């Protein structure tokens, strides 16, 4: 069930950030209203989270530049990542997790022409999907995000190629909130 996977992923993120069981349950209630899991289910989930390898859980710690080697981020490419971290802190008033930063770096390498908020949004979607896959035991599904990165529909001259690909493969289009494709020739007008 998708709602439970979403809740379990959110519970994991909150748990790994140091929230108490009561805090996790309260935030799940606010986000998922009447479909919120029980305290008993949350206890089972937390028990399973405690069994995850330390290397996985460390990716939820706040990003630290001096640990780029641990995150497998080349130092030569860390300047862009530091700029993204600064932008995120300025707008969200928090430091990204190591997992978020790692995905931002990957997105920034594949799509360097995107703005900082677009890179962060796409990177966060990848990070969330990775967590959903991890807590559900299923491989993460990145088809829609990969198509967006590969076919770059935010470029006017590539919108049709992207539309053709997603239609032929039955992939749901990605429509980032930071996508300015409402403009003439943009993504939202082509799909």
Image: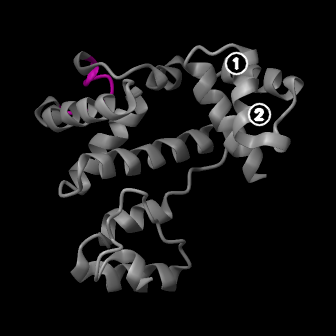
User: As drawn, is 4 to the left or to the right of 96?
Assistant: right
Which part of the image, by quadrant, shows the C terminus? bottom left
Please identify the quarter of the rendering in which residue 51 is found: top right
Q: How many marks?
A: 2
Q: Residues within 10 Å of mark 1 (few under 14, many from 20)?
A: some
Q: Residues within 10 Å of mark 2 (few under 14, many from 20)?
A: some
Membership of 69 in magenta stretch: yes
Image x and y of residue 131, in percent = 56, 39
Query: Would you say the magenta stretch is mainly helix, strand or loop?
Result: loop
Image x and y of residue 108, in percent = 24, 48
Image x and y of residue 190, in percent = 39, 84
Q: Is residue 8 above or below residue 181?
A: above
Q: How is the image coloured?
A: one colour
User: As drawn, is 62 to the left or to the right of 30?
Assistant: left
User: Depth check: 183 or 126 in front?
Assistant: 183
Membership of 16 in magenta stretch: no
Q: Is residue 180 above or below residue 6?
A: below
The local secondary structure at tag 2 comes to helix
User: Depth check: 71 or 8 in front?
Assistant: 8
**Of callouts 1 and 2, which one flags the residue occurring earlier in the amino acid sequence?**
1
Q: Which residues are magenta?
A: 67-74
Q: Are marks 1 and 2 in contact (CB under 8 Å)?
A: no
Say which residue label 2 marks: 29
Q: Residue furthest left?
A: 76
Q: Is residue 43 above or below residue 184?
A: above
Which residue: 46% across, 65% down? 174
Please identify the quarter of the rendering in which residue 172 is found: bottom right
Say which residue label 1 marks: 23
User: Depth check: 23 or 6 in front?
Assistant: 23
Which residue: 52% across, 80% down? 169
The local secondary structure at tag 1 comes to helix
């Amino acid at each position: 069930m998708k709602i439970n996977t979403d809740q379990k992923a959110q519970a994991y993120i909150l748990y790994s950030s140091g929230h108490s069981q009561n805090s996790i349950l309260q935030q799940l209630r606010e986000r998922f209203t009447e479909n919120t899991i029980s305290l008993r289910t949350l206890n089972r989930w937390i028990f399973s989270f405690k069994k995850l390898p330390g290397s996985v859980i460390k990716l939820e710690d706040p990003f630290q530049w001096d640990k780029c080697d641990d995150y497998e981020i080349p130092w030569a490419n860390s300047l862009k990542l530091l700029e993204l971290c600064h932008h995120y802190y300025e707008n969200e008033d928090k430091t990204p997790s190591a997992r978020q930063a790692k995905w931002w770096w990957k997105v920034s390498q594949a799509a360097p022409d995107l703005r900082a908020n677009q890179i962060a949004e796409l990177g966060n979607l990848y990070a969330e999907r990775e967590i959903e896959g991890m807590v559900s035991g299923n491989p993460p599904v990145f088809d829609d995000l990969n198509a967006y990165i590969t076919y770059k529909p935010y470029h006017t001259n590539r919108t049709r190629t992207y539309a053709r690909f997603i239609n032929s493969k039955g992939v749901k289009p990605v429509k980032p909130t930071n996508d300015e494709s409402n403009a003439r020739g943009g993504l939202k007008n082509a799909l």
